[in-house]
Amino acid sequence: MGILGRKRAFSDALLPLVIAFLFSTIFVENFTVVLGLNYTKYRQVSSLRLVRIQKHLDKINKPAVITIQSPDGDIIDCVHKRRQPALDHPLLKNHKIQKKPPEMPKMTKNKATLKENEEKSSSSDDQLNRNMINKDDQKVMKDAWQMWHKNGTRCPKGTVPIRRSTVHDVLRAKSLFDFGKKQRKFSLHRHSDAPDVVSGNGHEHAIAYTGTSQEVYGAKATINVWDPSIQVVNEFSLSQIWVLSGSFDGSDLNSIEAGWQASPELYGDSRPRLFTYWTTDSYQATGCYNLLCAGFVQTNSRIAIGAAISPVSSYSGNQYDITILIWKDPKLGNWWMGFGDNTLVGYWPAELFTHLADHATMVEWGGEVVNTRPSGEHTATQMGSGHFAEDGFGKASYFRNLEIVDSDNSLSSVHGISTLAENTNCYNIKSFYSNEWGTYFYYGGPGNNPQCR
């Protein structure tokens, strides 16, 4: 072999190492400057780890029929619905995608309870009705519900939009195993009738919840969307519905979750995004966010789970909200998710679950943040709008029209909810009832402040 041939062979052998080195170096530089957040600096990435990550990405990023570039930098792949990640799950090997629309829950009203609550809360009615969101705002919200829609391109019929995951997304996670997963919550203490949310790894909440004595087949609420400030990359702020069954003390808790979330670690920015989650073993090994593992079957071609929501609410300005409905189809038993005006997004197949294969025993609505105490003090990551519940409409974040689905597949307004917040100096919650909003609550807070250390 001549000198030129040897040089070329040496260059070819060296190329993968050079690419791996450059990739890791570029990643560290980009990672520390995005949005000016206090991102943790990661060690440089080995070529072996990059190979493992790419193999995983090849598994979850399915071939696209067309690809759409979102204005916020996201890449949305339009994937044929029969090639989506869900069907890679071992329990769904023989699963046939549900084609027939599920039976939507019917709306009912308990007039006696309604009258009783109206009498209790007439003052909140007056205040609320003076400040109701106008219909024009609601229309704008419906027309521009996700940022990737803004360029006018849509996924073709028969495909589903999937936010593409990148090497950077995985590298922000603690490990490849942890990518797309919630950290397991280790409970410190709880009352016998309260949900297992008081945790030892920095998770803090402001939630409303039902009792555990009833059979529940779904839940619904309308949530206004904000863009809370996130202090550190591995913290998040979310507002969601939890549909739960199983043991809160053991390792068999089943949970279905959906709402909006700001998570720099998961998405690379702090924009609020529509998200889903599920687990069947108390967040240990099963389940994940969005479509980052096999499980959730998407059926809608217009809604991308994990994509940014736009527009968002502003302080003393327009309020934009989303409606989330989760319910069990009484015929086939799958847990469906509705978004907005009863638009079907997809479903969690019944085969995934143990306790939830039958029914839920508790529903929670509210906010959650992670407090990592980066400098020995409480984090300044905001929940909701970053304002306390007592600031009210247009300033505090809200959940309105809380409803549950019963065994007859009927929706009814929730009554007699309990509320919980671990540290009311940091984040709090206050619930009410009105004619227009049914059972509702304001919640949230700024985190670190003179009373919250």
Image: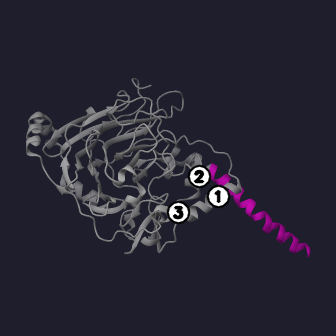
Residue 166 lies within the magenta run? no
Compared to residue 364, the image places residue 155 above or below, namely below
Q: Residue at x 39, y 42 (%)?
A: 228
Whether residue 184 sits left or right of residue 105 in the image: it is: right
Check disc 1 and report its element: helix, strand or loop: helix
Provide residue 87's location: percent of width, then percent of height: 46, 66
Check disc 3 and report its element: helix, strand or loop: helix
**Quadrant in the picture for the C terminus:** top left
Instruction: Compare marks 1 and 3 and give the one earlier in the sequence.
Output: 1
Provide residue 195's location: percent of width, then percent of height: 35, 37
Task: Determine the CA span between mark 2 and mark 3.
Answer: 13 Å
Mark 2 — residue? Answer: 176
Whether residue 76 sits left or right of residue 122 in the image: it is: right
Front in this rendered view, residue 178 or 263: 178
Mark 3 — residue? Answer: 60
What's under tag 3, amino acid-wise?
Ile
What's under tag 1, amino acid-wise?
Arg
Provide residue 85's location: percent of width, then percent of height: 48, 64
User: Can the viewer see residue 439 in this picture?
Assistant: yes
Q: Which residues are magenta?
A: 1-28
Mark number, residue 52 = 1
Whether residue 176 sits left or right of residue 247 in the image: it is: right
Q: Are marks 1 and 2 in contact (CB under 8 Å)?
A: yes
Other residues around mark 1 within 10 Å, as few (<14) / some (14–19) / many (≥20): few
Front in this rendered view, residue 142 or 274: 274
Residue 431 location, quadrant: top left
Front in this rendered view, residue 236 or 337: 337
